[in-house]
Image (tube, helix red, strand yellow):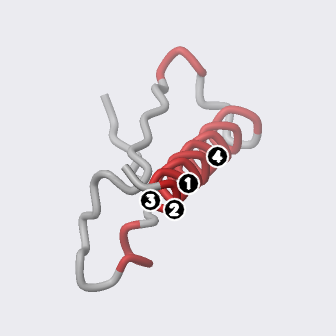
Amino acid sequence: MRTKERDRRLINERLSRERAEAIYNVLVREFGVPASQLTISYFGGVDNMYYDDPRLSRAVIVLGR
């Protein structure tokens, strides 16, 4: 894998993780959702739900259990 591609992948993964952690923290701290009911998952640039518009793939999806 070329260096630029690897760097881009690592950056996307970090941004994805930070985005998911930010939502997790808001749900726990501001809305009182028990942390035990939440799981953080992130995919970086691996799973683009919307190939036509990458901005739409920067979504955070919250699923209920």
Mark 3 → mark 2, Cα distance in angstroms: 4 Å
Mark 2 touches mark 1? (CB < 8 Å): yes
Q: In this view, does 12 lie above or below 36?
A: below
Does residue 20 appear to the left or right of 60 in the view shown?
right
Task: Tell which circle, 2 or 4, labels the residue nearer the N-terminal end.
Answer: 2
Tell whether label 1 touches label 3 (CB within 8 Å).
Answer: yes
Residue visible at 47% across and 51% down in the picture:
6
Which residue corresponds to the image point at 67% horizontal and 41% vertical from the top-left? Answer: 31
Residue matched to label 3: 5
In this rendering, the label closer to the viewer, 3 or 4 = 3
For the residue labelled by badge 3, is the local secondary structure a helix, a strand or a loop? helix
Location of the C terminus (image quadrant) = top left
Asked if the residues shown at circle 3 and circle 2 are in contact, with their CB atoms under 8 angstroms apart, the answer is yes
Extreme bottom residue here? 52
The residue to which callout 4 is attached is 18
Q: Which amino acid does label 1 sit on?
A: Asp
The answer to whether 52 appears left or right of 28 in the picture is left
- Residue 4: percent from left, percent from top: 51, 62
Image point (56%, 42%), residue name: 17
Question: Residue 33 at x, y = what percent?
Answer: 60, 30
Foreground of the two, 44 or 4: 4
- Counting labels gives 4
* Position of residue 54 measured from the top left corner of the image (x, y, whole percent): 37, 76
Q: How far apart are marks 4 and 1 (CA)?
A: 16 Å
Q: What residue type is labelled 4?
A: Glu
- Inter-mark Cα distance, 2 to 1: 5 Å
**Residue 60: which disc?**
none
Residue on which the image places disc 1: 7
Amino acid at dot 2: Lys
Q: Which of marks 4 and 1 is in front?
A: 1
Q: Which amino acid does label 3 sit on?
A: Glu
